[in-house]
Amino acid sequence: MICITLKLTVKPERVEGLLDTLRRLIPEVRKEPGNHAYFFHRVPGTDNEFVFYEQYADEAALLAHREHIARYGIDMNNLGELLAPPPQRQLLELFEG
């Protein structure tokens, strides 16, 4: 299982556009084969700080997800257009005892 957290600080003028895209995207991502979790959180007390939490069955599911979201115009190469600093990405391994 591959787990990822991604902290984003979005440029204030880009927040509403991102939220509009995510309203359409999130339900579709949750239907992807191999996707176990896809949650988007706003950091309390902020208007433009967000955290994704994602889980994928394996590397193939993660790669398929990246291809899927690229169709919405989102990829790691163009996030600079949306974000103030670069995203903080953390790859995790799920401990299943």
Image (tube, rainbow, N blue to C red):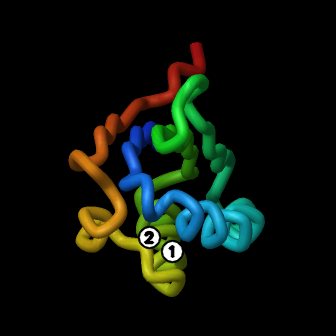
Determine which residue is flagged by label 2: 66
Q: Is residue 1 visible?
A: no
Q: Is residue 38 above or below residue 27?
A: above
| Amino acid of disc 1 | Ile
Q: Are marks 1 and 2 in contact (CB under 8 Å)?
A: yes
Q: Position of residue 24 (x, y in %)?
A: 72, 73
Q: Is residue 93 above or below residue 68?
A: above
Left/right placement of residue 1 relative to residue 37 reads left
Depth check, front residue: 83 or 70: 83
Depth check, front residue: 39 or 58: 39
Q: Is residue 75 visible?
A: yes
Left/right placement of residue 4 relative to residue 16 reads left
| Neighbours of disc 2 within 10 Å: few (<14), some (14-19), many (20+) | some
Residue at 41% x, 58% y is: 59
Q: Position of residue 40 (x, y in %)?
A: 62, 45
Task: Tell me, for residue 96, which label it has, or none.
Answer: none
Q: Is residue 45 above or below residue 23?
A: above
| Neighbours of disc 1 within 10 Å: few (<14), some (14-19), many (20+) | some
Q: Position of residue 83 (x, y in %)?
A: 32, 55
**Quadrant of the drawing holding the C terminus:** top right
Determine which residue is flagged by label 1: 69
Residue at 62% x, 38% y is: 41
Q: Residue reaching furthest top? A: 97
Left/right placement of residue 95 relative to residue 38 reads left
Q: CA distance from mark 1 to mark 2?
A: 5 Å
Q: Quadrant of residue 79?
A: bottom left
Depth check, front residue: 6 or 85: 85
Q: Secondary structure at mark 1?
A: helix
| Amino acid of disc 2 | Arg
Q: Residue reaching furthest bottom? A: 71
Left/right placement of residue 77 relative to residue 74 reads left
Q: Secondary structure at mark 2?
A: helix
